[in-house]
Image: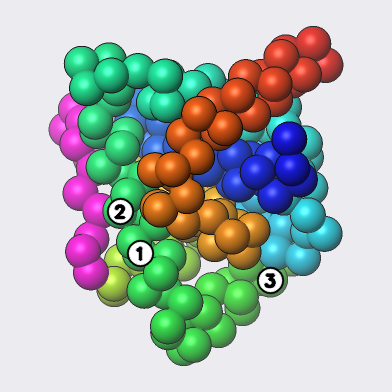
Amino acid sequence: MSDKTRDQVIALAGVLQAAHMVKELAYHGTANTPAVESSLESVLRIDAPDAEAVFGGPAGVLDGLKVLRMQLAGDAQTRDMELARYAIALLTLETRLMKRSDLLGTLTQGIEQANANLEHFPLTHANTLARLADLYKQTISTLRPQIIVNGEQTHLQNPDTANKIRALLLAGIRAAVLWDQVGGSRLLLLFRRKRYLETTERLLRGSIHSV
């Protein structure tokens, strides 16, 4: 198992974990707190030395690895196409974001401000989530195509839930940036499906044992 393959799987699991948390919030109004926190923390780790450090190790994307295993091992009937749609949209938007130095500058500045804000408000505080959500609206939401989130209107119209969803979409973009940085591509995903699944299984076994 090459380090690059491991890094690519962790990054892709990060994309899917963010997408999965978005879907859970949109339909149920709640999501797995450790997974949400791990994804949100990844946004602020812009200077992490490697892929694992972005999420604090593979255990930080445990939910994402489970979803990735399902997507890689399943067939057309068992795969979650809504999650796949979110993931593809995040990867597409990341590609477009990388061509916009103005938006990248705004993102960097906003993330630095959010980091400084942690001295006053914790990561999951409404104030911090509102800052990250606003940063998403200022940057990623200006790109096309916009991500349309499906779910229950009761949850989607709740301001706090909507902010958390946008903050997690920002986390999905962060993971997509990592995927790009470690050499991930749709072509690799097509031709290395079996290798990615094997790596996902190994990471899952190690993460579950370490919890």
Q: Earlier in the sequence, mark 3 or mark 1?
A: 1
The residue that mark 2 highlights is 89
- Left or right for 132, reference 204: left
188 relative to 34, above or below:
below
Rounded to the nearest angstrom, the CA distance separating label 1 from label 2 is: 6 Å
Q: Nearer the viewer, mark 2 or mark 3?
A: 2
* Type of the residue with mark 3: Glu
Secondary structure at badge 2 equals helix
Image point (19%, 27%), residue name? 152
Q: Quadrant of the N terminus?
A: top right
Q: How dense is the environment of label 1, judged by Cα within 10 Å: few (below 14), some, or many (20 and up)?
A: many
Image point (25%, 53%), residue name? 147
- Which mark is drawn over residue 93? 1
Q: Which residues are magenta?
A: 144-157
The residue that mark 3 highlights is 112
- x and y percentages locating residue 167 in the rendered image: 47, 51
Q: Quadrant of residue 57?
A: top right
Residue placed most toward the observer, 206 or 195: 195
Residue farthest to the bottom, as pictured: 102
The answer to whether the residues at label 1 and label 2 have Cβ atoms under 8 Å apart is yes
Rounded to the nearest angstrom, the CA distance separating label 3 from label 1 is: 22 Å
- Left or right for 173, reference 199: left
Rounded to the nearest angstrom, the CA distance separating label 2 from label 3 is: 25 Å
Q: How dense is the environment of label 2, judged by Cα within 10 Å: few (below 14), some, or many (20 and up)?
A: some
- Left or right for 81, reference 202: left
Secondary structure at badge 1 equals helix
